[in-house]
Image: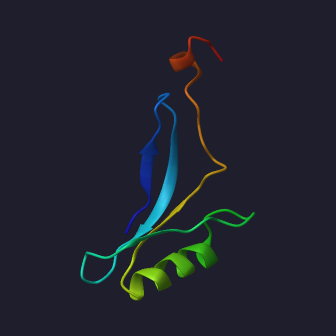
């Protein structure tokens, strides 16, 4: 699956790597990335959970792009 964009309440965004189980159903697992980002290792871990029947997602939590104008300020 390609990366997805997650929108926040303040208009900012972040990306995430999703992996879906073969059945398209299953419990969800949130995979928290390591210091080097959502790299091949983290994608592999996320894919491994999906192979076990879970819907897994690994958000790039440290690459959040806020929208300062949504809070009434300017950059």
Q: Residue pushed farthest bottom?
A: 52
For the N terminus, give its image quadrant.
bottom left
Q: Residue pushed farthest right?
A: 35
Looking at the picture, how far across and down is residue 39, in whole percent? 62, 69
Question: Which residue occupies 62% across, 13% down?
Answer: 74
Report the colour scheme: rainbow
Looking at the picture, how far across and down is residue 35, in whole percent? 75, 63
Is residue 7 placed above or below 57 in the rendered structure? above
Question: Which residue occupies 66% across, 18% down?
Answer: 75
Observer-nearest of 22 and 75: 22
Is residue 6 placed above or below 27 in the rendered structure? above
Looking at the picture, how far across and down is residue 41, in whole percent? 63, 78
Is residue 27 placed above or below 16 in the rendered structure? below
Query: Total label count?
Result: 0
Question: Which residue occupies 49% across, 85% down?
Answer: 48
Quadrant of residue 53 in the image? Answer: bottom left
- In the picture, measured across the screen, residue 15 lies left or right of residue 40, that is left
Is residue 18 placed above or below 43 in the rendered structure? above
Question: Which residue occupies 50% across, 52% down?
Answer: 15
Quadrant of residue 73 in the image? Answer: top right
Looking at the picture, how far across and down is residue 13, in whole percent? 50, 40
């Amino acid at each position: 699956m390609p990366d997805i964009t997650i929108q926040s309440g303040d208009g900012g965004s972040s990306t995430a790597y999703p992996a879906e189980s073969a059945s398209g159903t299953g419990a969800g697992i949130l995979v928290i990335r390591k210091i080097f980002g959502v790299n091949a290792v983290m994608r592999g871990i996320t894919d491994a959970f999906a192979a076990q029947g879970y819907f897994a997602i690994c958000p790039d939590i440290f690459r959040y792009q806020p929208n300062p104008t949504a809070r009434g300020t300017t950059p």
